[in-house]
Amino acid sequence: MKLFIDDAHLDAIKRLLAVYPIDGVTTNPSILAKVGGNPVEVLHAIRAAIGNDRLLFVQAVPTDAEGMLRDARAIVRAFGKNTVVKIPSIPAGFQAIRALRDEGIHTCGTVVYTPLQAYLAAKAGADYVAPYVNRIDNMGYDGVAVVKEIQDILTKNDLLAEVLAASFKNSQQVLTLCAYGIGSATAAPAVIDAFVKNPAIDAAVADFVRDFAQVGHGKSMADLLV
Ligand code: E4P
């Protein structure tokens, strides 16, 4: 499963990139609004931080197909070939996804709340479909189950789009979908940090350090091996 950071704060992105095996960054208009400032400058700074090989997801803002196409072309021109344009999975979006596929521009059908939205976005030619786990939960449905159903629909219909599960509130949701075999997940920094936030892990590491101090007298292996 590929893992993306669902955030646009540069400090958080740099911190996570330094320690975790991260495949890129996903953004949306609300995420950019939370950072403030000029969204183009923010996105250029993110591209510089993640390098040209990682994926950057940027959402088209208009809600009509022509506007989505204009945004998509401009986004890829500005942020490079490893940029995926997020297109809302609405009728105009399916139209735009189809046209962008023909132009060789990679897309993600986003704002996915239902399996049939994902089916249509994938069939239109989206490279990714992004179901919103936590938002679906908040509507009284089971977000994880919806994502599993979408994965099954894509597999059974030989649709090539990859699931990019989004809108997570906890690491358990990510774990369940990782075990199910979805292609990608994007999560906020706090959710990614929680993958390894566990008192048992911290206690085990502390035990190793304390035990070795008895024989190493506070030195590391490198110190002892000189
Ligand atoms: C990603 O594609 C979505 O835009 C994002 O994960 C939504 O997350 P939220 O429900 O926390 O706003």
Image (cartoon, rainbow, N blue to C red):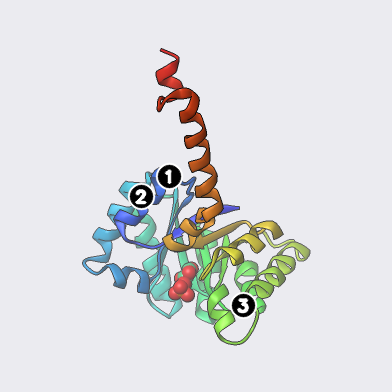
Q: Would you place residue 200 above or below residue 144 in this image?
A: above
Residue farthest along the front direction in this orientation:
214
N-terminal-most mark, 1 or 3: 1
Q: Would you place residue 216 above or below residue 174 in this image?
A: above
Q: Amino acid at mark 2?
A: Arg
Give the alpha-carbon distance from disc 1 to disc 3, as whole Å.
Answer: 35 Å
Q: Check disc 3 and report the residue beneath it.
A: 117
Q: Amino acid at mark 1?
A: Val
The image shows a total of numbered marks equal to 3
Residue 160 relative to residue 88: left or right? right
Q: Check disc 1 and report the residue beneath it.
A: 19
State if disc 2 and disc 3 touch (CB < 8 Å). Answer: no
The residue at label 3 has a CB less than 8 Å from ligand 1:
no
Residue 71 image position (x, y, % from top left): 37, 68
Residue occupying the point 46% across, 67% down: 86
Using the rendered image of the protein, determine whether residue 125 is visible from the camera's viewpoint.
no
State if disc 1 and disc 2 touch (CB < 8 Å). Answer: yes
Q: Check disc 2 and report the residue beneath it.
A: 15
Residue 37 image position (x, y, % from top left): 21, 67
The quarter of the displayed image where residue 142 is located? bottom right
Q: Amino acid at mark 3?
A: Gln
Residue 38 image position (x, y, % from top left): 22, 66
